[in-house]
Image: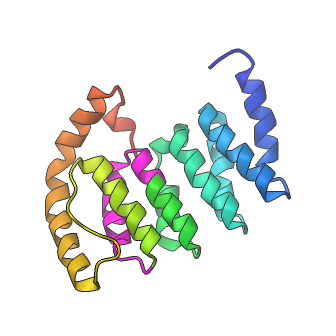
Amino acid sequence: QQEGSEEAADILARYITDQDAKVAARALYALGRMDDPRHAEAIKKTLTDDRATLREAAVYALAKSSGRKDSKPVVEVLQADQSPSVRAAAATALGQAHAWDSMPNLVAALRDPDVQVRRNAINSIIRMIGIDPLYRADDPPAKREAAIRKIESIWPTMADAHAKYLERIGRDPKQQGR
């Protein structure tokens, strides 16, 4: 970290609970980009805020920050948040974090009632497995289900290839999505 960045992170952390949702969301995004592990828990706490805007910002902040090493809070958002936009953001964040352990949850999200959640989930799956399994979020349910079965048979065989890819791009596969 650069000199003074800890102080800046501390200042931003004070704003993530601001009453103005725009201010709090911008603080979350900025704090996530700073990758200061001291504030990961504070970011995680905003995943339960009443404001969907903040929950969405928090999942993106975790994807960019040290919090990406622990995908469980974002998986919980993907599975249970009432807001489709927040679930969609969680699906994207898991892909950005290369959270391989979340793959069963991303596959389950392909059955989400919201088309954007399904789109973001398949984009994250493609990002991690490196191939397009020809799932289309707006296809009829029977066609989507056939593609999901194909994905369920493919992705478990790709864990080693995904780990090698992460090593090639300079990321520790043991630190992704744990």
Q: Above or below — where is 38 with respect to 142?
A: above
> In front: 65, or 89?
89
> Which x, y percent locates residue 32?
61, 40
Q: Residue at x 43, y 46 (%)?
A: 96
Task: Determine which quarter of the picture holds residue 30.
Answer: top right
Using the rendered image of the protein, determine whether residue 76 is visible from the camera's viewpoint.
no
Task: Determine which quarter of the picture holds residue 106.
Answer: bottom left
Q: Residue at x 33, y 61 (%)?
A: 122
Predominant SS along the magenta part: helix
> In front: 41, or 52?
52
58 sits left or right of 113 in the view:
right
> Which x, y percent locates residue 29?
65, 44
Q: Which residue extends farthest top?
A: 3
Q: Above or below — where is 82 with respect to 52?
A: below
Q: Above or below — where is 101 with respect to 151?
A: above
Q: Is residue 136 highlighted in magenta?
A: no
The number of discs equals 0
Q: Above or below — where is 170 with respect to 30?
A: above
Task: Determine which quarter of the picture holds residue 2.
Answer: top right
Magenta residue span? 93-113
> Which x, y percent locates residue 128?
30, 48
